Amino acid sequence: MDPDRLKQEFIKDFGVGYQVFGMSRLMGHIVGLLLCEDEPQSLTDITERLSVSKGPVSQITRRLSDKDLVHKAYIQGSRRDHYQAEEDIFGQAYANHATKQTQNLQLARKYQQMIAEAPDEVPAYFRHRVDEMARFYELMLQHQDAFKAEWAQVRQELAVSAPTAEQGETS
């Protein structure tokens, strides 16, 4: 397949993937584009490649930057903002998700405490569901710690075979 067409399909599918997770399709398109390109991309480059206006791209790149998924990159001699994907964008996305799981555990523990303070007033079924919620997120977070450690190891292994600038794009 033609490399440009392959990249366009990847960008399109990445947008669909983001949409499945309840995020904007354009956000996925931007991430997909930045994953396809080794060099930082200016907002103008991004808007032209995706055929969208600069306003939404600027807002979304700012949100992606706030989530540590992309960062501004300095390009000597250019006054434009350029962006590129974070080195471990997938690990960072996972960490962002894990933060939500921690918040859910805190919510469950809050209600366990409230239920403990008034046990006779709370239906047994509700008490059981809150306990189940707490245990679910405790277990999930235990597994997330193991996953993060394993992912760090896999990234080290992948780094050994990563292409370098000297190898060019065809390697």
Image (tube, rainbow, N blue to C red):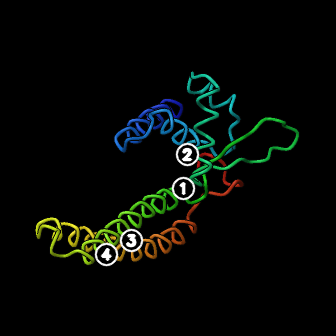
Q: Which mark is residue 144?
A: 3
Residue at the spot of label 2: 35
| Residue at the disc numbered 1 | 89
Whether pointer 2 and pointer 1 mark residues with C-beta atoms closer than 8 Å, the reply is yes
Mark 4 vs mark 1, CA separation in Å: 36 Å
Query: Mark 4 or mark 1, which has the lower sequence index?
Result: 1
How many C-alpha atoms fall within 10 Å of the one at disc 4: few (<14), some, or many (≥20)?
Answer: few
Say which amino acid is labelled 2. Leu
Q: Which mark is residue 113?
A: 4
Q: Earlier in the sequence, mark 3 or mark 2?
A: 2
Tag 4: amino acid: Gln
Coordinates of residue 83 in the picture (x, y in percent): 68, 43
> Which of the marked residues, 1 or 3, is nearer the chain's N terminus?
1
Up-down relation of residue 113 to residue 72 (above or below): below
Three-letter amino acid code at the position of disc 1: Ile
Give the residue at x 57% y 23%. Answer: 52
